Amino acid sequence: MKSGGPRRVTLAQVARLAGVSVMTASYTYGRPDRVSPQARARVLRAAAELDYPGPDPRARSLRRGSTLTLGVVMGERLSYAFEDPGAVAFLTGVADVCTDHGYGMTILPITDDADDVSRVTDAAVDGFIVWTTADDDPVLTSVRATKRPAVIHGGPSLAGVQLVGIDNRSAARSIGTLAFADARRPAVVSQPLTRDRVSRIERGLDIAQASFPVTRDRLTGYREAAADAGIPWGDVLVAVCGRNDVGEAQRLTTQLLTSPDRPDAIAAMSDQQALGVLRAARAAGYGIPDDLAVTGWDDVPAAAEHGLTTIAQSLRDQGMACAHAALGEQPEEFSTAWSLIRRTSTRR
Amino acid sequence: MKSGGPRRVTLAQVARLAGVSVMTASYTYGRPDRVSPQARARVLRAAAELDYPGPDPRARSLRRGSTLTLGVVMGERLSYAFEDPGAVAFLTGVADVCTDHGYGMTILPITDDADDVSRVTDAAVDGFIVWTTADDDPVLTSVRATKRPAVIHGGPSLAGVQLVGIDNRSAARSIGTLAFADARRPAVVSQPLTRDRVSRIERGLDIAQASFPVTRDRLTGYREAAADAGIPWGDVLVAVCGRNDVGEAQRLTTQLLTSPDRPDAIAAMSDQQALGVLRAARAAGYGIPDDLAVTGWDDVPAAAEHGLTTIAQSLRDQGMACAHAALGEQPEEFSTAWSLIRRTSTRR
DNA sequence: CTGTTAGCGCTTTCAT
DNA sequence: ATGAAAGCGCTAACAG
């Protein structure tokens, strides 16, 4: 970005032409009430004559000590984030609060390369909101190093940084119990375990290797639910998806359903994934829930349409809570609520 | 946003503690190659000791004259924008280019109240990208007043501001011809006409009253297509939706289909709307395309699934083109291409 | 209501 | 390789 063409017109020049002090000119823009109508008019006329573009926001933010902008750190390629209805709901919540406070919202895309650190450090924002990421994400360090207010959504939790999210383990155990009720061969369709996002199918997965805390907690909850149903974790098939979308889940589910010991219950980690599971099941001629019980997560509108048993949490509210926190407002005990929505895709 | 706690640590303090000049400290961060390893080490040690958060991006951007951020102006409540797959595709394109150039992307939500102007003026961004809006949107004036590079997507076209988009009139005429083929009572499901976004159903709509140029151009194209088919515009029912989504289109279509002279062909303005039309038609027991021909716009993935005849345009590419332009790169003759995708929802 | 002074924290010269 | 000076453009703080 080059500084376009002729030299920038400054407030000082406007003031000179208007025959007033710089402060009067400044007040004309920043605190119009502090200026007489005549002075104001002269300043505005001079500004028009000079084609003054208004006070430079960079200078302003330096002087004021605030940028009036919040930064949202999104891992993964942004394309994915926007395709994820959960992420979109979250962003909507953030945006609404920003709008109400006269703040802008800067999206900081993280690409897993070296300049992620500088991308965060250099961002002219007053505070950060970090969308769920992995324990070992270097961005977390950068964010904390800025000393600016920060909130993490989902996880990981980091000393000195506020965390907004639900108790994923409890919620997973709770919905897992429904998913695995009367099942012999339960399976899980999981979100990515690690930042490399490789997809694979595995039995008796080592949960500790998952570096996304949200995923880890949900797996743990599912394991507990399986145990409650008398099924050892070693017997549970886990299909790990590299992306959180319909297609990937459908693909892996198709594989699951054609394997010798095809599952009769699948707990997914998002409604998107669950929809993929349902598609695969339908294509394979499975009856829901008799042949296959399915559960989702998030309760997006499509979940109701498909009778999907799921966990309801308001990502939008969580986005709002994050924004409030990043704005330095003490949230009056923000409760991160979730609830179990029982529909027709499970046996109970 | 308050300046948190104790006084901010500055580069000068770091330099003093390290026993070097401010410039050496500055170089350590900005141009490490210009500094000896020893000096660098001492600066870094001092910085660590002082818990220096790194150079202040606000001061940096003032001095450098660039913020390394692009602003995207989105009309409507952001919630709507994110729910619109077209807008999301567009944003993805913008984001990808920003990322590649080490730029951030600031979303500037416009709410139609008085501070929209200041929201734009105050935005610390190097350039603006304006998502389709109405002729009379005051934001356009603000954007141009900043003198910073700007691009408008869709419309309106504004002297001195680059425009990226397709020829909506030609495209509409082209797909309208398919939609209205062999039809007796063609109708249009339209996007909003004006910024107040009222929805209504009207026959022989006065196209000139539409202040969204994109909508206006498409209506004009549909009128031409109707005329080509020998149907006067005065006979064409137009259902104007307040929002560009499935539900609204479904609701209005249901009304259309229960009216005495229910249409036998509907040209919509987005695939979202067309999906709503299809739902309403299905609910009313209409056969597609025999009882009702339907066309969409955008060619989102769902369009293919539903056999929807539609206009394909890459909103993502258009987002990329806008970003390039806003970054001041001369786009080597960006061609805004569209094509007609003929599927099974039309009679021809 | 208006003006003066004093920087915000950094980096671009241009020396050395 | 390092440093001194000079501001980027604006506004808080305090007079008048």
Image (tube, coloured by chain):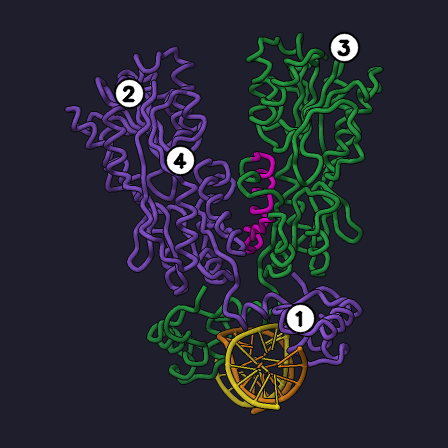
Chain colours: A purple, B green, C orange, D yellow
Tell me if mark 3 has few (under 14), some (14-19) or many (20+) residues whose alpha carbon lies within 10 angstroms of its own: some
The correct choice, above or below, for B81 with respect to B246 in the image is below
Q: Which residues are magenta?
A: B84-110
- Can residue B152 be seen here? The reply is yes
Query: Does mark 1 fall on the same chain as mark 2?
Result: yes
The residue that mark 2 highlights is A265
The quadrant of the picture occupied by the C terminus of chain B is top right
User: Circle 2 marks a residue in which chain?
Assistant: A
Q: Choose the circle earlier in sequence order: 1 or 4.
A: 1
Q: Which mark is residue A242?
A: 4
Please, what secondary structure does the residue beneath circle 1 have?
A: helix
Element at badge 4?
A: loop
Does label 4 or label 2 sit earlier along the sequence? 4
As shown in the figure, which amino acid type bears the numbered disc 3? Asp
Q: CA distance from mark 4 to mark 3?
A: 48 Å
Instruction: Give the CA separation, mark 3 to mark 1.
Output: 63 Å
Q: Are marks 4 and 3 in contact (CB under 8 Å)?
A: no
Chain that bears disc 4:
A
- On the rendered structure, is B159 left or right of B23? right
Residue pointed to by mark 1: A28
Which residue is identified by label 3? B182
